[in-house]
Image (cartoon, helix red, strand yellow):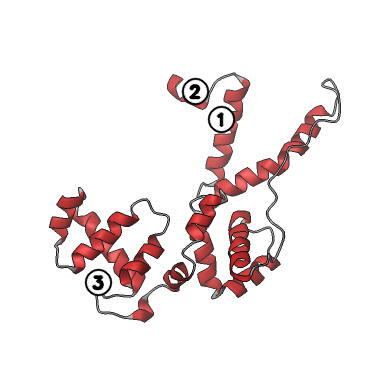
């Protein structure tokens, strides 16, 4: 049960199998140094992984078992193990499940989280969409409409029209805001997002690719 819980908690991590194997071997009596050599890691890194696993399950690996010490988030990860695959399937980003479980831990239940998201419809659109999908799977109904995948409105005026530039900005704005929101949900800062978009736009105008610009510098 402990290893199953850890697998659920590490969910989307590409190293989940390795981490679970480390914990299993440690529980069988293997030492940090031997595990480090076997998996090509430093001893300190192995210790960090084992210590994190111990915190996630509330002890029983390195320390005395105290279920109350386990993060409530880990229980939710066991209750909803499909969230990681669901986020990937719907292209919501690899960080969105972490935000979802953090919000779920704060709310205390899926029902309370959905109510919170209803009151704050503009907050974290991809996390809100993931909450909607989970609720729909659990209850068979959607608490609110699916997140709109922004389309680009076609131009309604000739190329030489004075308002053409403004119309283009208005047409791009929904997709732009969605892109910025998804980037922020994935962990990028506002400055990083803005600078990268400026660089991409500048390279586009000059007929370059971002890699061309980086290579030239």
Q: Which mark is residue 141?
A: none
The residue carrying mark 3 is 61
Label 3 crowding class (10 Å Cα cut-off): few <14, some 14-19, many 20+?
A: some
Q: Residue placed at 21% from the left, 56% from the top?
A: 44
Q: Quadrant of residue 123?
A: bottom right
**Element carrying mark 2:** helix
Which label sits in the foreground, 1 or 3?
A: 3
Crowding near pointer 2: few (<14 within 10 Å), some, many (20+)?
A: few
Residue 199 marker: 1
Which badge, 1 or 2, is on the more N-terminal residue?
1
| 36 to the left or right of 205 | left
Give the CA distance from mark 1 to mark 3: 48 Å
Which one is earlier in the sequence, the residue at label 1 or at label 3?
A: 3
Q: Residue at 53% of width from left, 69% of height from top?
A: 104
Image quadrant holding the C terminus, namely: top left
In what element is the residue under mark 1? Answer: helix
Q: Is residue 134 left or right of residue 172?
A: left
Q: Which residue is mark 2?
A: 213
Q: Earlier in the sequence, mark 2 or mark 3?
A: 3
Q: Nearer the viewer, residue 6 or 45?
A: 6
- Disc 2/disc 3 C-alpha distance (Å): 50 Å
């Amino acid at each position: 049960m402990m290893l199953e819980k850890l697998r659920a908690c590490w969910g989307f991590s590409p190293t989940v199998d390795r981490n679970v194997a480390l914990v299993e071997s440690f529980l069988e009596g293997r030492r940090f140094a031997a595990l480090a050599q076997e998996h090509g890691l430093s001893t300190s890194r192995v210790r960090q992984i084992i210590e994190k696993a111990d915190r996630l399950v509330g002890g029983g690996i390195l320390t005395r078992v105290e279920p109350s010490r386990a993060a409530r988030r880990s229980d939710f990860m066991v209750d909803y193990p499909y969230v990681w695959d669901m986020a990937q399937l719907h292209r919501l980003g690899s960080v969105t499940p972490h935000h979802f479980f953090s919000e779920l831990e704060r709310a205390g239940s899926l029902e309370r989280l959905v109510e919170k998201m209803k009151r704050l419809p503009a907050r974290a659109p991809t996390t809100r969409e993931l909450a909607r999908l989970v609720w729909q799977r659990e209850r068979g109904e959607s608490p609110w409409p699916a997140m709109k995948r922004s389309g680009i409105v076609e131009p309604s005026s000739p190329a030489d029209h004075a308002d053409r530039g403004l119309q283009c900005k208005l047409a791009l704005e929904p997709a732009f805001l969605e892109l910025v929101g998804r980037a922020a949900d994935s962990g990028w800062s506002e400055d990083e997002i803005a600078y990268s978009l400026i660089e991409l736009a500048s390279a586009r105008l000059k007929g370059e690719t971002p890699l061309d610009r980086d290579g030239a510098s």
